Image (cartoon, rainbow, N blue to C red):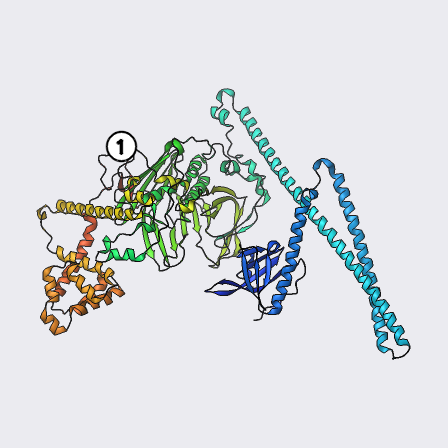
Amino acid sequence: MSEPKAPTPAPGDTYKGWLFKWTNYIKGYQRRWFVLSNGLLSYYRTQAEMGHTCRGTINLATANIAVEDSCNFVISNGGTQTYHLKASSEVERQRWITALELAKAKAFRMQAESDDSGDDSTPPAAGQGAGSRNSEVQSTLRTLGSKVEDLSTCNDLIAKHGSALQRSLSELEGVRLGGETSEKIRQVTERATLFRITSNAMINACRDFLALAQAHSKRWQKALQAEREQRVRLEETLEQLAKQHNHLERAFRGATVLPPSQSNPAIDSKGPVPGKGDASDEDEENEFFDACEDVQEFITVPADPKYHRRSGSNLDEQSLASNPESPQSQEVVPVRKRRTRIPDKPNYSLNLWSIMKNCIGKELSKIPMPVNFNEPLSMLQRLSEDLEYYELLDRAAKCQSSLEQMCYVAAFTVSSYSTTVHRTGKPFNPLLGETFELDRVQESGYRSLCEQVSHHPPAAAHHAISERGWTLRQEIALASKFRGKYLSIMPLGSIHCIFEKSNNHYTWKKVTTTVHNIIVGKLWIDQSGEIDVVNHRTGDRCHLKFAPYSYFSRDVARKVTGVVTDKDGKAHYVLSGTWDEKMECSRVMQSSRGGENGADGRQKTVYQTLKAKELWRKTPLPEGAENMYYFSTLALTLNEQEEGVAPTDSRRRPDQRLMEQGRWEEANAEKQRLEEKQRTARREREREANRATNPSEEGKEPADGGKVSFYLSFCSSLLVSSAFSASLVYSRLSVSLSFPQALIEDSISDSPLKSKYSCSTSSFSTLFNCHLLLLPCMLTSLTPLLFACVPPSSSLLLQLKHCMVHTRQHTQASGHQDNYRPMWFERQVDPKTGEPTHIYRGGYWEAKEQGSWDSCPDIF
């Protein structure tokens, strides 16, 4: 379908149309929608993007426009921005060039006038009175009126002389050649001259009117802006006076109701305690925000003004932003000065072959992952980063209403993801028994302890307690799925937050984290899913929805929305924001059905809300964070050396310390040593468990232990051997895998097997390699191929059957043979959720005070 041709550009008009823009050598020229307006050239992928996503803008006031050929031209502003554009035809290119040149001249002229005007076009001061302003406006209006009259006169003259000229031309056409011809030509020439003079006068009058209008329009715009700013200042002053008046009234009521002998000393020192009904009267005159549409679940609109006098929310601006009792506004003197930098991340290139060559001939469980993929923090330290914005829980502990407290808890839930937006590095997997303490009692009023309580599957327990009335505990295990282009990480386990004063107990789970561009491209992280924060005491609930990123979505990226409801399902607050920047809440005054239909065909709920209040805003990253793994201010201090911590603390982990110092080769070697030490300790625990279970079998080798070991080694070796030829696999069968001698002789030297079924050892290895490419290392998948290539009467088949049976038994029993018990946590069934979890048993901080770490294992 052909595009409608754009009109010929005129000065000051907005010019729009399709152009082809050069992107790169792979995609070449791509069709884009360009818009020229107010001296700015912007482009979008489609016309629908004009309302929300601009792909680029260039200022024509300082730009250079050059024509390359019949359809191509270039726009550049000095090197920072250069657009290589191509029109569909030469005529279309000329239209764009004309529009761009006119817009450039106009933008340059406006910029020069703005620079020249300076303070001359500043509106008169308030002290000069309104008379001077009125006289100036009246004078300007009179001048403009006279110019309009001149234009009207010129218009009449042009019409008069134009009609006379038309008559003369008509008469000239009917004149015969003769004596009167020269007379008629003279009359036409005179009338044409008059018409030209009148037209010039009209043009000059229009030019003067335009110049005058432009000059005074700029001054009036500045004067209007000054009036608007003055009005805003007056409104703010009036609002402050109203709040002060309200505080004085409440103070007066409190002073008159309570006798002096019964007055509360807390009131005298901290100000009056607000009553239940008038706690937020200062919010009653706040302006309402504009309508905001959530295309996913609900719609919010401004509440009716009749609810002004009925607002009773304590979530006012003081409690959210400028509460003098808030931990943010208190002047805290830290006990020690924490570090603000770590060594910059070295720029080491990742050589894939250097990793692969170390995997040849090894079992999968013994292949170490290099630290190139890591960041110098352990998973326990990343778990402690959830307390980055602990002050949200401090504020929540002071709330009188459970619904308002729920808003802060929900904001705290979202804030824990703010540190992940740029953190694509993988944290170190903690060793079994590894711990991490975060003691911030004197600085922030809380202390935290994490411990790795399980290794298969990996799980970490976390317990934090604050002097300001809250406790946070969680046990997190990770499940991951590799989807080809991206990796999905699903945290398992519940998070609990308990407030001592109100006895409110909140629980929630984490959303799914997705790491994109695993194979090709720049890594980036997204959070998606839904969270239900539940108050088990009151039945209140907050449903949060993390919208997944979509390139075609009109919504803000990383958007989070939520609704706080009571036990009856009535909505009280609407939450909105992004998980990487801020969260706001709006009090719901009324809700109803009747919005536009959603994706499921049902009508959306419409919430009438008050003006949004900010609950949380992300703290900017420290300077140079891009060279320090994008660590936040708290993350920079987590691996700082501290005295008195347990021997199992993550700060004492040598491979992690070496990586932080930039010594990655040594860190890789140390990491491999620690992992091998952990495997040795696990085998020792299994032997001890076997001896405790079967004392009579002590010192004996299991009957089929060699077969189980062979089968496990054989299966794990297949994954590594897929890159090598069949002969190399055969050579590794007898050398690297250490088969039992009887089995090797039976499978390789069995001459009847070779002669009868013509199944050589090389073909046997080749078949295994073919099966490896389909489903490697899966017991159920290996069975059909083994049975197909080996005759039923062969002892190899029988022994492999025994190996499979004992392997299953060994795998099932392995979870019960490891008798490891965590040092500071014990496994219990949670009474609120019914899930088995690890809960802090106590004793760590007492051991730290006494300096008694004798019971700690030596894991480093």
* Residue at the spot 58% in from the left edge and 31% down from the top edge: 244
Q: Is residue 366 visible?
A: yes
Quarter of the image for residue 64 reads bottom right
Task: Count the marks.
Answer: 1
**In-front residue for pair 202/462:** 202
| 273 relative to 74, above or below | above
Q: Residue furthest top?
A: 261
* Residue 369, position as x, y percentages in the image: 29, 52
Would residue 142 appear left or right of 359 to someone viewing this image? right
| 392 relative to 680, above or below | above
**In-front residue for pair 53/842:** 53
Would residue 742 appear left or right of 132 to someone viewing this image? left
Would residue 107 appear left or right of 825 to someone viewing this image? right
**In-front residue for pair 571/143:** 143
* Residue 558, position as x, y percentages in the image: 45, 51
**In-front residue for pair 105/509:** 105
The residue that mark 1 highlights is 847
Label 1 is placed on what type of residue? Answer: Ala
- Classify mark 1: residues with Cα within 10 Å, few (<14), some (14-19) or many (20+): some
- Element under label 1? helix
Q: Quadrant of the N terminus?
A: bottom right
* Residue 470, position as x, y percentages in the image: 38, 36
Would residue 34 appear left or right of 536 to someone viewing this image? right
| 422 relative to 169, above or below | above
Q: Quadrant of the C terminus?
A: top left
Q: Is residue 537 visible?
A: no
* Residue 495, position as x, y percentages in the image: 35, 44
* Residue at the spot 79% in from the left edge and 62% down from the top edge: 199
Quarter of the image for residue 36 reads bottom right
